[in-house]
Image: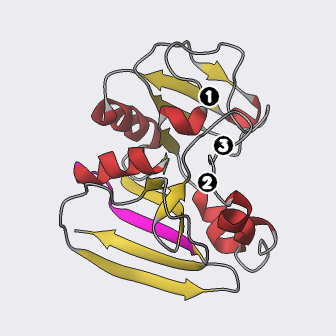
Amino acid sequence: MTFVFSDMAISADGFASGLGQTAQKPFGDCLMDDLLRWRFEGAEENAAEIDDIVNAGAFVMGRNMFGPDRGEFDQDWTGWWGPNPPYHGPVFVLSHHTREPLEMEGGTTFTFVTDGIEAALEQAKAVAGTDGRVSIAGGATTVNQYLRAGLIDELRTHISPVIFGEGERLFLDVPAQPMSIVSARASRLVTHITYRIG
């Protein structure tokens, strides 16, 4: 059975990004450097968690995680990551607007899915295989949709010591459900907590 997981970097008060996302500010009006400092300044100390974030056979992400535009796609926009995104595999992007698949360097192909979260996940599972892994890459709104639908097996939170006060919150409108802690590890800049869902 395909294993479905998600990694979310969040603030101490549960936000994955701020409001006001633009092409220049992928995380909106928030202290992005504080949220992700552990991935750069603390890269060696958190190497195992960083490596595991992109260790999947396929990925699903929301439209906002792919880019800042709304409505019809800006065909010149190829994502926040430059010509060689970190995924190096198939990425299924949830959208209300069609776009032809976008092939990038390193084996990343963005496929745009317009018929819902279940359809995107089924396509990702088909690519990853029954013994494979699918990452629900984000953002928070997308992860919350999959949590509401009961479609995530494991949630890994990476909690940074910063308060945003507002923004895109993890667990927004997610119904009560049991979780168990698989692992917890604190480092200098982040606390990693992994939950098994259900």
Using the image as rendered, state which of residue 111 and residue 114 is in the foreground: 114
Please, is residue 102 above or below residue 87 in the view?
above
The C terminus - image quarter: bottom left
Residue 58 is situated, as x and y percent measured from the top left of the image, at 51, 42
Q: Nearer the viewer, mark 2 or mark 3?
A: 3
- Furthest-front residue in this view: 165
Which of the two discs, 1 and 2, labels the residue nearer the N terminus?
A: 2
Mark 1 surroundings: few (<14), some (14-19) or many (≥20) residues within 10 A: some
Q: Is residue 11 magenta?
A: no
Q: Write down the residue under mark 2.
A: 54
Using the image as rendered, state which of residue 114 and residue 165 is in the foreground: 165
- Furthest-left residue in this view: 176
Q: Residue at x 63, y 78 (%)?
A: 190
Relative to 135, 48 lies left or right: right
Q: Is residue 158 magenta?
A: yes
Q: Residue at x 69, y 22 (%)?
A: 77
Which of the two discs, 3 and 1, labels the residue nearer the N terminus?
A: 3
Label 1 residue SS: strand
* Residue 109 - label: 1
**How far apart are the two marked residues, 3 and 1, measured between alpha carbons?**
20 Å
Residue 12 is situated, as x and y percent measured from the top left of the image, at 52, 74
Mark 2 surroundings: few (<14), some (14-19) or many (≥20) residues within 10 A: some
Amino acid identity at mark 2: Val
Span colored in magenta: 149-159
* Residue 26 - label: 3
Amino acid identity at mark 3: Pro
Label 2 residue SS: loop
